[in-house]
Every structure is written in structure tokens, then in C-alpha cells.
Image (cartoon, grey):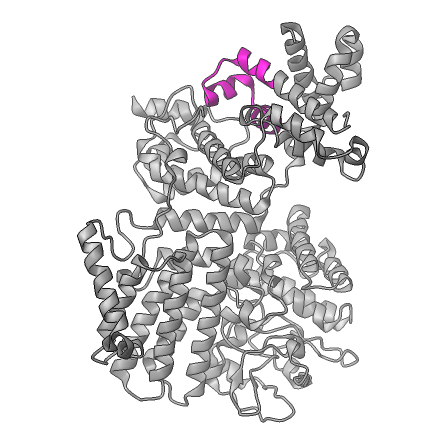
Amino acid sequence: MNDRLVELLDEGIRAIRHGHTTPEDFLARHSADAAELAPLLHLATQLDARTVPPLAPLARTRISARVQGGIRARPGVSHGLRWQRPWLVAAALAAITLVGLGGTGIAARDALPGDPLYGVKRGIERLEPMVRREEAVDRHIRLSKRRLDEIRALAGRRDHARLSAALAAYEEEYRRLLAAAASAPSAAADRAVREAAAQVTTLVELRAQDAEPDPSLAALVDRLTEVTVGLAAAPALPERPTAARSAAVPTATLEAAHAGQPDAIATLLQAVDAAERSGVLTTGQAAEVRRLLQPGAARESGTSPDAATALDRLGAALAACAERGCADPATLAALHDVLSGSALALGLPQPVTPRRSGAAQTDASGTPTTQPPRTNPQVAAPAPPATVAAVGGAPGAVARPTSPTVAAAAPTETTASTSPTVGPAATPSAAHATVVPATPARPPAVAAATPPTTTAAATPAAGAEAAAPALAAATAAPTTPRSMPTPTPTATPTATPTPAGSPGGGR
Amino acid sequence: MQQDRLADVTAGEAAGAPPVSADTLARAIARDPAAFTELYEAHVDRIHRHVRYRVGDPDTAEDITAQVFLRAWQAIHRYRPQADRPFIAWLFTIANNLIVDHHRRNRHRLTGVMAGRHAADVLDPEEAAVGADLHDQIVAAMRRLKPEYQLIIALRLIEDMEYEEIARVLGKKPGALRVTLFRALSALRADLAARGIHP
């Protein structure tokens, strides 16, 4: 190596990058050094930013959620107990042993809020981190499940005070779970989001089972539904665990796509690609959806001034497509997931019309179930044409989350063996409505392809990916400040920036 | 005075990042979450690109990118603007430390010498040359280089930063950086050649 070669390489890279020359021309002009320069120049031209995939919108959302979760956390507030004195640790361990192994501990295990031993139970829980190694997310999943069990045990007893205490304890733990998820690695965050969504679904079911649900329970369901909108419900949709990975598209992108902007449409198409890769859409379905997302289709109903309208218009375009029979119902339902998932994740109203084509299902015992008909071959009842007519002239439109009252007015579907008995309490689920083609020749199997009930938490399209902004919001603005944990990001000393703007560089 | 220095820092941001006002930087240093969010928005793409190129795995790149900003937030109150050193230089340094930590933990990092040894007992050169896209091979080889070489390739060729900018990031002289890039590309070529790949 000599200085001249170094300078020539630098000059060549610069000239080629600026388009002033080509590698061949440059090497021809420096033929004496071409043998040494050529491979290095060719390598340099292979390495540029174009070869790095851009930060995908979904990945950006996830990163943003984690960062926001970290920077919005209150500094200096510890999680749980901080025992720093060895003697205190020893005392605590002794207490755990005594309480945990003694009859008191065993009795306390099943204690409910209001029971004399409930305090002992919670005290043991607070000491557990000292003797039990587990990720914060897993700890909060475990504890939130326990709080949920307590609610379940108290739900039918008509004891407002105790149920309220259980609900408060649950909500506190639930928010801790979301906060832990916000600062957890992707896999753990995904786990937490799925669990959170499943738990809200359980609460919705609890509320639905009671003709006169406790107002505290009803209020909690409403609150958590709002918080959880946009979170995944993979447990309820085992066959579509990755649906959400393709679902959340920024509102601005939808709007821009609607206006026919190629980049935005490309982003939507990427979502469809992801849906196809993950098995959410078949190849044929993906092809249909891609065709739907072409600029012409998106512009069919003109431009829109805001994102919500854009969603509406896209839904309307979709409906028009359905009328023409341009795609099968499952495809339309899948595209609906993409669109409505985006809206839910962003807290936007769903486009177009309040209705529930996939109304709550009941099993043989009359218990509402959250299993999507898609996974249950017994549920195959088509959506009545009247349902389409009831949506205000927008057949096939994507539905908007509705009030229970509105949803209750929509025709419901049932399995062959049960009658439609789903009342208002079971119907916050219009958040997950669907697209119903009006063409009779195409059996509206969309209903069967649409998860029937529950909150947006059970919306597959909202998904873990879409959960990120909701997570950030949930952790940034808890309704119960005292329950706000502090997911302070941990830092290894080797990577922690050092003061004075010299963050440990020069390893 | 402090504002002047902040203005210099933000004005000196490497090409490609949206402008961030000196006031925003000052508020971020005062631990204003909204201001830090602006910094995050301005730099996340470049930091992610840098990390992604060096670690490859998208999930890991995502995790490290988030960690870069979380750790920057933890230490932002200690950040001292330097007129000739853009803010993103600080982020790049944090990113580099995290990437090195990652490779160390996973024992994927090989020095140039080790890469040569590794090459000798891994693949038949002809087999190596077939079946994989040339660019993928080049990128894989780059990730086998020692961190110093990875960094100069990433900043100069991927980020398209001028040597003067890189010098401010790394605290080295531009001339030395030119030499480092030459050596990095030579090491890259040697690594590939050992696998029967001749770009």
C-alpha cells in the first residue's frame, strides 16, 4: 500500500459516487494501478445505502414505542422493592419461607380482595422477585392473570366493594404489564401484548355473561378496551398469529395511498406482501388485494382531506370492488383487517358504517365465544343480505367501532345449533367488523372469515405490530398514576455514554 | 454562548438528517421528552441503517437501535455539545459500542486474521462462490471484519459521510481515515478471495 493508491481509491470512490465517471473509465485512466485498484473500487461500489433495507414502518413503530416507553417513564422510581442491606434480604427470605411454607401462606394463596389473608398474599408477591428469577414481562403476565382470576371469582357475587377492589388491583397490574412491554425486547413485548389482549377479551366475556354487570366492571372494560385498541389478540386467533405484522400502516400512508401516491401504495403493498409471507393471505388473495391497491382503485372516490376519510374512501373503493365481484370474501376480509387494523392502532374511527356482519357467536351452552368462525367449521352461517342493506348504502364497507346499542341493532349470526342471544353487553366488537360483498353469487363467507366478537383487543389486524403506539400511549398516560411503573432501561456500563459528549467511544 | 455551540452542533449534522434546532437540542439536554423525541425522529433512520448494516439480523438491529436512543436519553443530561462534532456523532458512538458488545456476546466477530483462518476450513471456494448472491457475500464478509474496519466502511460508504465528518465522529484525522478505509477494503477483498470470491 502506498499513499498514492490511497488517494486514488478515495478519488475514484468520490468521482464514481458523484456520477463523474465509471469504474471502467477511472481504471482506464489509471491503468498502471488498475490491477490493485479494481477490486477495491468494485467492492466500494457494491457497498452503499441502497443495499440496506429502509426502516419499515412497523419496525419504526416498535422502536418508537420502546423509546417512548423509556423516555416517558419517571426517573428514579423503582420497581417494587429495593433491598440493599443484606440483613434485610435475609429477613425477607426468612419471612417468605415462614409464610410460604406455613399454613398461612397456603391459605393466603386463594385469598380474594376483602379476605383477611389477601394482604398476606400480596405481600408474598412483592417479595417474590427476590427469590424468583423471571423477566419483568413474565412476572406481570403471571400477576395480571392472578388478578384476573380474582375478578372471575368475585364477578358473580354481587359484592360491589370487593369486586371494585379486585378490578382496581387488576388494572394496576395490567398497566404494569404494558409498561414492562414498552421497554422489553421484541419477543417479550409481543408476548405481553398478546396476553394483554387476551385478558381484555376475557373481561369482555365476563361482562357479557352477566345481564346486569357491575358498573365497575363495565367501566373497566371500556377503559381497557380503549387502552388496548391496537393490541394483538393472537391467542384468540391461533391460525393468524402474524396477521398484525402486515396490518398496521400509518394513517398518513393510507391517506397518501388514497391520493394515489406511489410510495404510500408501495408501503401498503409491502404490508400485503408480509401478509402473504406469513400466510394471512394466499397468493391468489394477495394478488387480488394488490390489484385493489392500485392507484386507480384507491382514487375511485376522489381525494380525502383527512385520514379517517381516506380510510372511508378506501373502504368504499373496496365495497365497489366487492360489488363487481372482483375479489372473494376472504380477500376482502383480509384487506379489511389491514385497513381497520391501521385505524384501530391509530385510534381512528373505523371507516364507513357501524355494523357487525360477524356478530358474536355462541356455543352450544350459549356462552359467547371469541373463537373466530374462520377456525370453527361449525360456524358457517352466511351473513343475511339484510345486513348489507342495513349499512346505509355502503355494502362491503369497513365497519366502524360502534356503541353497544348500535351493534345490538345489527342482525347477529349464530351457529346452527344455537340462537342469537348476544346482547348489547357483548358487542363492543364492531371494532372488528368486516367487509361483506353484496353480490349474491358470491357466498358471503366473509362472515365466517371474520372474528365475531370482543373488543378491538381481539382484532387480529391490530396485532402486536400495531400495539406499539398503543403501548406507548398506555404507558405514557395511565389513568391510575399510582400504578405507573417505571420501565427504566437498563444499561451495561460498557455501552453507557460517558459525560462530556464522549460516550465511551474508541474501544 | 451555549446556544452558539448548540447551533454549531446542529448545523454540523451530517447530510441526510432533518435539521434539528439548537433550541430543541438544548431542551433535550434538559431532559425534555418532546425535544428528545424530535432528535429521535431526526436520527432514527440513519442509526437504524448503520446498525442494520453491521448486525444484519433485523430484530437485533431493531433492538440495538432502540437501545441507542434509550441510552442516549439516560445520558443526555451529560452530553456536552462540541462545535465540531455533530450530535449524531454521539449516537453513532453509542451505536458502535452496542454493536461491539453484541458481537462480543455472540462471538460472531472475527478479526481479520481469524477470518482468514476461518475461511480456510469452511467452504470449498467454488461452492462458496455459487449459490449466494455476490452482494450478500460482500456484506457477510464485511461483518467479519474487525469493528474499526466495519465502522469506516459503514460511515464512509453506507452513510456516504465525508472524511471530515467521520473525523469529527471518531476523533481521528481524515488522512488516517483514508488509510483505514483502504485497509478495510483490502481486508474485505482478502476475506472474499479466501472464499473464492473475486468481485
Question: Residue B165 colored magenta?
Answer: yes
Q: Which of A142 and A383 is in front in this view?
A: A142
Principal SS element in the magenta part? Answer: helix
- The answer to whether A140 appears left or right of B169 in the picture is left
Left or right of residue B78: residue A423:
right
Q: In percent of the image, x 58 and y 82: which residue is there?
A: A359
**Is B198 situated above or below A240?**
above
Magenta-highlighted residues: B152-181
B72 relative to A419, above or below: above
Query: What residue appears at the point 30 percent right and 24 percent down from the top-left corner?
Result: B2
Q: Quadrant of residue A95?
A: bottom left
Quarter location, residue B60: top right
Asked if residue A312 can be seen in this view, the reply is no
Q: Which of A116 and A310 is in front in this view?
A: A116
Return the x and y of residue A190 as percentages of the image width and height.
50, 59
* Residue at 37% across, 22% down: B82
Residue B150, position in %: x, y? 58, 27
Residue B35: x, y in percent? 37, 40
Magenta-drawn stretch contains B163: yes
Towards the viewer: A17 or A497: A497
Depth check: give the residue in front, B89 or B139: B139
Split into 4 quadrants, where in the image is the N terminus of chain A? Answer: top right
Residue found at x 52% / y 81%: A407
Q: Is residue A493 visible?
A: yes
Query: Would residue A429 appear left or right of A134 to someone viewing this image?
Result: right
Name the spot of residue A262 as percent of width and height, x first.
68, 47
Describe residue B9's horizontal placement relative to residue A21 as left or right. Answer: left
In the rendered image, the quadrant that contains the C terminus of chain A is top left
